[in-house]
Amino acid sequence: MFSSLMPPRGEFFELLANHADQVVLGANSTLRLINSLGLGSEDIPVLVAEVNLSERNGDQIKSQLITLLHRSFTTPINRDQIHALTIELDNVLNTLKYVANAVAMYNVQESTAEARELAALSADACMRLSRAVKGLADKKRTPEIKELCRAIDAIESEADRVQRKAIAQLFQDGGNIWTAMKMRQFYSLQEDVLDCCQDAAKTIEEILIENS
């Protein structure tokens, strides 16, 4: 009975790694989606469905992690931090879903250079976040994880710059105000993905500090 309260150490890390994998899949599908707008080279509804599937898979993993936390007497790292990281990975997936679904909701038929750049930055940050999450199981990878977290922070700062430039451009071109308003919201959703990645990276840094 007591052993059931102490699951193998690797079980938490495996679930976190699986959750991070879904983040990468969702980000890559979102990147393909945004790069395909207006080109007719990809089936847009299929790509939106891929992002939504990653989000649903992530929800299942989140549920497994929280259940494991509730029934575990001990955890390999602080249980509150495991919970926080799980929720933050879920937030990344939720925001990727919002971006993908906004394509139809806002009737975004063509991409822009800024939208493509934000999507590429998001995919890069999500890839680095996944590597950082997977490194938590090995203390020898602490320097690598710290560098990955710093890189995510830098990517988020770059995304802020791109978003500001994109929004300024919208209102300088004298175009349709409705188009400007919907693209402003679309860019904001894209930047939110980077904010969520940054939040997760900060939790990972806290985990490293507590376990150093």
Image (cartoon, helix red, strand yellow):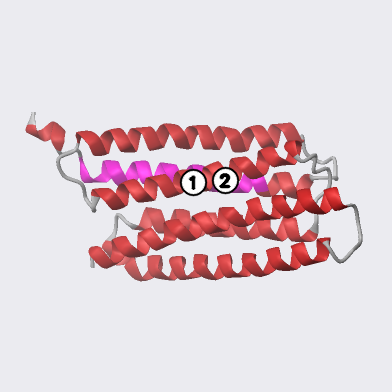
Tell me residue 166's x, y (percent).
76, 63
141 with respect to 56 (left or right): left
Q: Is residue 54 above or below residue 1?
A: below
Question: Nearest the camera: 81 or 178?
Answer: 178
Assign a secondary structure to mark 2: helix
Q: In this view, does 162 lie above or below 44?
A: below
- One can see residue 30 in this view: yes
Q: Residue 95, which numbered label?
A: 2
Residue farthest top in this picture: 1
- Residue 98 shown in magenta: no
Relative horizontal placement of residue 27, taking residue 15 as reference (left or right): right
Residue 127 appears anywhere in the view: no
Three-letter residue code for mark 2: Thr
Kind of residue at badge 1? Asn
Residue displayed at 73% across by 56% down: 116
Residue at x-position 21% and y-position 50%: 76
Q: Residues within 10 Å of mark 2 (few under 14, many from 20)?
A: many
Query: What residue would you read off at disc 1?
Result: 91
Q: Where is residue 25 in the image (x, y as percent from the top left)?
A: 56, 44
For the residue carrying disc 1, how many other residues have a C-alpha within 10 Å: few (<14), some (14-19), or many (20+)?
Answer: many
Where, quadrant-wise, is the C terminus in this rendering? bottom left
Image vertical order of residue 114 relative to residue 34, above or below:
below
Residue pictured at 57% horizontal, 65% vertical = 156
Q: Does the magenta stretch include residue 29?
A: yes
- Check contact, mark 1 vs mark 2: CB within 8 A: yes
Give the number of the disc on residue 193.
none
> Magenta region: which residues?
8-30
